[in-house]
Image (cartoon, rainbow, N blue to C red):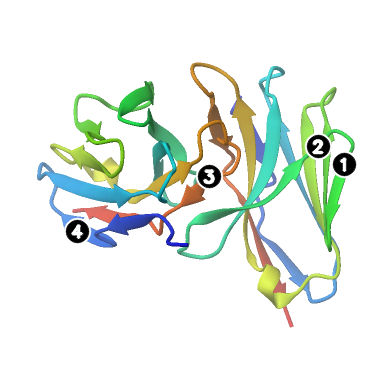
Amino acid sequence: EAGVAQSPRYKIIEKRQSVAFWCNPISGHATLYWYQQILGQGPKLLIQFQNNGVVDDSQLPKDRFSAERLKGVDSTLKIQPAKLEDSAVYLCASSLPGSINEQFFGPGTRLTVL
Amino acid sequence: RKEVEQDPGPFNVPEGATVAFNCTYSNSASQSFFWYRQDCRKEPKLLMSVYSSGNEDGRFTAQLNRASQYISLLIRDSKLSDSATYLCVVHNYGGSQGNLIFGKGTKLSVKP
């Protein structure tokens, strides 16, 4: 079974630039999550989708971050404009409906903002 | 106080050692508890759930004390392949499904 796919794997940008990340969850997983993991910290939830609807975006910095999952399958996370403190690994995860307990994570996108 | 707090680590142990990780959580309404494992520069993966009665999976034993809001993970007979960061995770219900709160993780390094 294919896992969660993410791209790009690495991205280096300068502050104030824009960047977008893509995620394709495991087939059949209606719930999709974006996490931010800063070095030395645990993953922090940014946004959770159920199909194409947002379930929780309370920790998403909406002045600069946006995410969408238009067709209820793959998703994009965008940062515009980026700040130095956005340097982190952005992890996408998916789970079956009602199975929040076991989330399957993608390999992540490592973002460096210079 | 952070929602999920773990031993700072790192833990450096020889092969064959027994090592224990502790974790406390602040939300008494938390419902479910887990340990995830994260290898260096890799994604987190579910290691095991934690139940009030305690549960064991091979060399790994997890315990939960709801009264003390305390979770533990015991690894017996450590292997080199156990070297990783162990994340304590709490599920807080709310909204549609609630969300997972991850601790900072405790790094384990098993040496030959």
Proximity of marks 2 and 1: CB atoms separated by less than 8 Å? yes
Observer-nearest of B111 and B29: B29
| Disc 1: host chain | B
- Residue type at mark 1: give it: Gly
- Would you name the residue on which mark 1 appears? B54
Considering the image in quadrants, where does the C terminus of chain B appear?
bottom right
- Residue type at mark 3: give it: Gln
Where A37 sits versus A9, above or below? above
Between the residue at mark 2 and the residue at mark 3, the CA separation in whole angstroms equals 18 Å
- Residue type at mark 4: give it: Ile
Dot 3: element: loop
Residue furthest front as drawn: A28
| Disc 3: host chain | A
Residue shown at 42% from the left, 37% from the top: A30
- Would you name the residue on which mark 3 appears? A103
Where A12 sits versus B24, above or below? below
| Disc 4: host chain | A
**Same chain shared by disc 3 and disc 4:** yes
Dot 2: element: loop
- Would you name the residue on which mark 4 appears? A12
Between the residue at mark 4 and the residue at mark 1, the CA separation in whole angstroms equals 44 Å
Q: Quadrant of residue B82?
A: bottom right
Relative image position of residue A11 (x, y in whole percent) = 22, 59
Q: Is residue B105 left or right of residue A75?
A: right
- Would you name the residue on which mark 2 appears? B51
Query: Which mark is in front, 4 or 1?
Result: 1
Query: Which mark is in front, 3 or 1?
Result: 3
Residue shown at 59% from the left, 28% from the top: B2
Density class for disc 4 (Cα within 10 Å; few <14, some 14-19, many ≥20) is few
